[in-house]
Amino acid sequence: MTPFTLSLELKRTIQSLMILTSCPLLSHHRSSSCFRSLPQLASSSHLAFPTSSPTPYMESESSTPSLLVLCGKSAAENELAKSLKNNNAMKLLGDDEVEVVLYSEVEDSLGNEGFRIRDYLKSLLTMSLGRFLLYSPRLPSTQDVVARNFCELPVGAVCVADVQFKGRGRSMNVWESPKGSLLFSFTLQMEDGRMVPHVQYVVSLAMTDAINDLCKQYGIRHLDVRIKWPNDLYLGGLKVGGILCTSTYKSQKFNISAGIGINVDNEKPTTCLNAVLQKSTSVPNIFKREAIMAAFFNKFETFIDVFFNQGFQPLEELYYKTWLHSGQRVIVQEKTENQDQFVENVVTIQGLSSSGYLLAITDDGQTCELHPDGNRYHIFSYSLSVLCVFK
């Protein structure tokens, strides 16, 4: 196949993918998540409403091969991208098909509708994280891409998509993620398994701090994005984002895939950063996905270096200033001996335990840990399992 023919085919593929990603999602479905939920249970901490059966829009997406664009910030990273393409090393999960291209091959064809790679790389100031990029207009899941190809990618590689239709949440929840969301996943690696539970807190903190940094840079009012334990981001009482961290253990190291989704331009199903900003400024769409992702990695690289060398304690004070739960009173429903009734008690959240879970204290001074279980929060104390409900 000649280079000229390849260029035309790539251009047609990109244009068709852009058309797919601009299709609107059904507006009558509701969810408190930043992503649209496929059938899941509702709970006190994470409401999800079932959608209808798969639509023709979803079917057309899943039947079209995904385009994966590879590039790096440095010449060495671009050489790695070329090697991965030439060796046909990049794979998707299951039967999903992928076409891998280099950014230099398609830069002129991508246009301005999708993620602007050049703008992102220009704003990125890191030494290692976020410098090797995988971009797609449409993917099943960025989290699955980095997890599936973890051993082929450098640590800190990031995958970003305009739309994903098999996005993942906690407890293997599946999400349909609309256009306008910033959707990305990246790789990390560590040896100490005791530190793994805290990674999601460092990720959450870096994202909230990055948004604050951009507000200062743009000279606009502070956006009070807060952390809801363990992995949600809230703004004005509504969920605008979420974090998912998964890990596998191989060759005496923990391979961590960290995923983030945050509403930037999509007001539905809850709200988004730019919608909240427009209430106080006449300038539309100040926040750009590229700037947010670059600001995140600029901040996260600093935070994760502190975390690896000193643990989470140096970051705790800032984390507690950002989260929603200090001094929060929580209703605890404890199962009775016959397991068919609940007795309600109240505990007060104190902070995080050394193992990364919520630390709470009862009114009579006893301490306990709150553990996430699926989409609910469970407490385990004195071998009793109890359900806690945030008010």
Image (cartoon, rainbow, N blue to C red):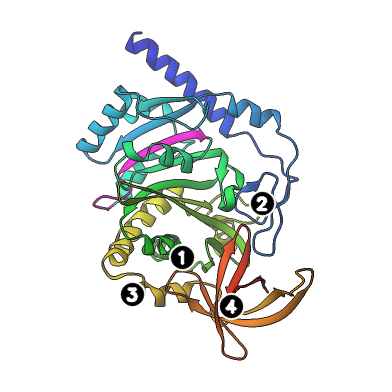
The spot of residue 41 in percent (x, y) is 71, 53
Q: Which of 266 and 202 is in front in this view?
A: 202
Q: Mark 2, mark 1: which one is toward the viewer?
A: 2
Q: Distance between the residues labelled 2 and 4?
A: 40 Å
Crowding near the residue tagged with mark 1, few <14, some 14–19, many ≥20 C-alpha atoms within 10 Å? some
Q: Does the magenta stretch include residue 134?
A: yes
Which region is colored magenta? Answer: 125-139
Q: Relative to 79, does residue 371 appear above or below in the rendering?
A: below
Question: Residue under circle 2?
Answer: 269
Question: Residue under circle 3?
Answer: 314
Q: Mark 2, mark 4: which one is toward the viewer?
A: 4
Q: Relative to 139, does residue 51 appear above or below in the rendering?
A: below
Q: What element carries label 4?
A: loop
Figure quadrant of residue 235:
bottom right
The numbered dot on residue 220 is: 1
Q: Mark 1, mark 4: which one is toward the viewer?
A: 4
Q: Distance between the residues labelled 4 and 3?
A: 31 Å
Mark 2 or 3, nearer chain start: 2
User: Which amino acid type is shown beneath numbered disc 1?
Assistant: Ile
User: Which amino acid type is shown beneath numbered disc 4?
Assistant: Tyr
Residue at x 71% of width, y 32% of height: 55
Crowding near the residue tagged with mark 4, few <14, some 14–19, many ≥20 C-alpha atoms within 10 Å? few
Image quarter of the C terminus: bottom right
Mark 2 or 4, nearer chain start: 2
Mark 1 or 4, nearer chain start: 1
Q: Distance between the residues labelled 2 and 3?
A: 36 Å
User: Which amino acid type is shown beneath numbered disc 2?
Assistant: Pro
